[in-house]
Amino acid sequence: MDERELQCSTAEPLIGWRIFRVRRTERGFLLTAPLIHDQGFERFPAKAIDAICYEHDHSAPAPGCRCGLYAAIDGTLDSLSGYLIDSAHDQDPAIYAEVACMGTVFIDNRGIRAQRIEIIQLAAAGPLWPDTAVHTQAVAELSDRYGVAVVDLAAIPQWVLVNARPQGAPPDGATVDLDALLARIGRQAAERLDNPTRAERV
């Protein structure tokens, strides 16, 4: 697996986007992994969460392993809306999240796998929910539980929306120039340091 490793501090996290499913549990509405419909697995009970490898006895993420907390950044190939099509059998509504990725972060063609993510904001659309009253209740609970704003889909970057395919994972053989992508990330980080009032997110 062609990948690059970064160390991202809490002061300079790598900003990405991901999707969750919103599931009603005995504790109220919770964010959960989008492709795993198991109420007891991969819940995200708090604003920040640390990765765990469920297959091997090592810290997550690890080189050559698919463990870690997933997100997409501009220039990588995973289609967030495509994963919703992949899991169209799942009736629980989806929600997009802007996340800060920290600690050890691996970047590959598909996206990034992070040691720790912290939710910055959530973006949801009422029409994606079957019941307006349930949507209103869920938004209020999620905002209170995670301590973030729940905004509409206009907050989602254009690169997330245009990368729409009938499946989440990229086609076989699709590649990304990871060295060029890392160079761009480095330039943007330097620009943020030079212009602290001008937040430019990857």
Image (spheres, grey):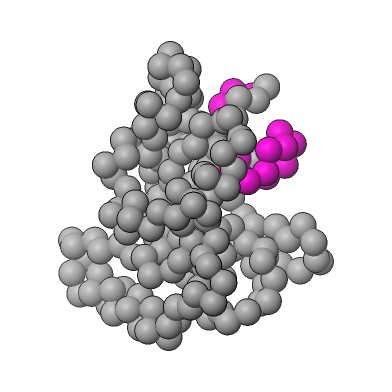
Residue 92: quadrant of the picture: top right
Residue 188 rendering spot, x and y as whole percentages: 28, 74
**Image quarter in which the N terminus is found:** bottom right
Asked whether residue 26 appears in the rendered view, the answer is: yes
**Residue at the limit of the structure toward the bottom, as seen here:** 179
Q: Nearer the viewer, residue 177 or 14?
A: 177
Q: Nearer the viewer, residue 10 or 62?
A: 62
Which residue is painted at 67% across and 43% down in the image? 36
Query: Magenta span covers which residues?
Result: 27-42
Q: Is residue 29 magenta?
A: yes
Which quadrant, please, contains the C terminus?
A: bottom left
Please say whether residue 143 is one of the residues in the magenta stretch. no
Quadrant for residue 189, please give it.
Answer: bottom left
Q: Residue at x 73, y 61 (%)?
A: 53
Q: Say whether residue 74 is left or right of residue 192.
A: right
Asked if residue 13 can be seen in this view, the reply is no
Splitting the image into 4 quarters, where does residue 116 fall? bottom right
Front position in the image: 140 or 82: 82
Q: Residue at x 47, y 70 (%)?
A: 8
Q: Residue 10's spot in the image, x, y percent?
A: 45, 62
Q: Is residue 1 shown above or below 167?
A: below
Q: Is residue 44 rendered to the left or right of residue 94?
A: right
- Residue 50 place in picture, x, y as percent: 62, 55
Indicate left or right for 68 with 79 as reference: right
Q: Say above or below: 81 vs 127.
A: below
Determine the main secondary structure of the stretch shown in magenta. Answer: loop
